[in-house]
Amino acid sequence: MAGASTYTVISRNNTVSITAYDNRASDIVAVESGNDIMIIEVSAPSTTTMKMSSALASHLGYSDIDLYVMTDYSYRAGVAFDALTDETIVRRVMLPTPETEQEAEQCAIIEQIASKKGVLLEILPNGCENIAFNDT
């Protein structure tokens, strides 16, 4: 049993693993690197999608999400992010630069939630391209 646990830690520190999850309503990509996990939400944010993201991280053996990347906004993005951070520890979140007034409103809501819950927030000016995560 100890050998299996040690192997998992060594394997996670030395390999990069990418998992894609598709459930009709959502597309989620998980990148494991350096014993950390990055979740990329490729579909419009919703509470269901974020709960699936949390479940995917948990299924892969992580109790928290080191980096959560939202690639889009929806009118539910703030509420969904609040629900995600209520049930899962999220260390850092990356958002695209808002392009409309509605997106700016949702971004402001997420900024307030992130500040309140101690989540580091980064706005990406390049539309979520070229994201560096550990050695990936």
Image (cartoon, helix red, strand yellow):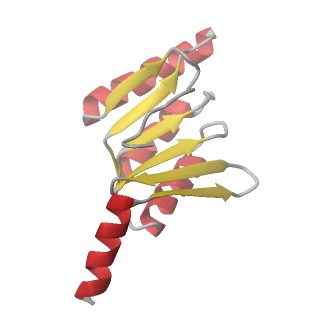
Quadrant of the frame with the N terminus: bottom left
The answer to whether one can see residue 62 in this image is no
Q: In the depicted view, which residue is nearer to us: 20 or 95?
A: 20
Q: Position of residue 74 (x, y in %)?
A: 63, 29
Q: Position of residue 134 (x, y in %)?
A: 36, 42
Q: Is residue 52 above or below residue 61?
A: above
Residue at image point 44% right, 19% down? 123
Q: Position of residue 135 (x, y in %)?
A: 39, 43
Give left or right: position of 22 versus 124: right
Quarter location, residue 126: top right
Residue projecting furthest to the right: 24
Q: In the depicted view, which residue is nearer to us: 128 or 54?
A: 128
The answer to whether one can see residue 26 in this image is yes
Q: Is residue 114 above or below residue 64?
A: above
Residue at image point 49% right, 61% down? 55
Give left or right: position of 62 versus 78: left
Residue at image point 28% right, 79% down? 5
Q: Position of residue 32 (x, y in %)?
A: 44, 55
Quarter location, residue 96: top right
Residue at image point 51% right, 61% down? 56
